[in-house]
Amino acid sequence: MQIRTIANSTPPARDASAVSSAPSSESRRISDDVAQARHTAMSALTNDRFRIMLEQITDPVSSGALMTMHSDNVVDFKSAQSSYADNSE
């Protein structure tokens, strides 16, 4: 798997007539959210641990093993709650 990205891409041009001279607080918030999401995505793409994990789960052998994993232990809610209470004391 290969991930390609352009780090310094420019955003698409906007219609100048639709943009007012002073952006509203809502548009600033949205712009900040988009910038933060982009920063997070770029961080994930350059993170070696994330890259290795992504390569492992996209490997057909590994993903097949992950799909067939299941738990044979079925625990009801009251038992889990009791066990949690015992361990938190």
Image: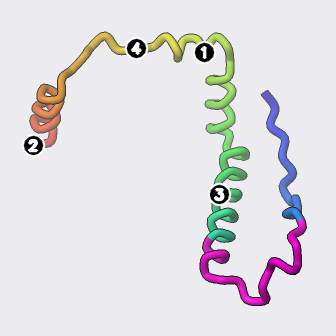
Amino acid at dot 3: Ala
- Tally of numbered tags: 4
Q: Nearer the viewer, residue 9 or 24?
A: 24
Residue 24 colored in magenta in the image? yes
Residue drawn at (78%, 85%) of the image:
20
- Answer with mark 4 or mark 3, whichever residue precedes in sequence: 3
Using the image, determine if residue 87 lies above or below residue 62.
Answer: below
Amino acid at dot 1: Ser
Query: Where does the magenta region start and end?
Result: 13-29
Residue contact at pointers 2 and 4, CB within 8 angstroms: no
**Residue 28 x/y as whole percent:** 66, 77
Q: Which mark is residue 37?
A: 3
Q: Nearer the viewer, residue 3 or 37?
A: 37
Q: Which mark is residue 62?
A: 1
Between disc 1 and disc 4, the foreground one is: 4
Amino acid at dot 4: His
Cα gap from disc 1 to disc 4, whole angstroms: 15 Å
Find residue 32 and report its image quarter: bottom right
Tell me the residue that label 2 is attached to: 89
The secondary element bearing badge 3 is classed as: helix
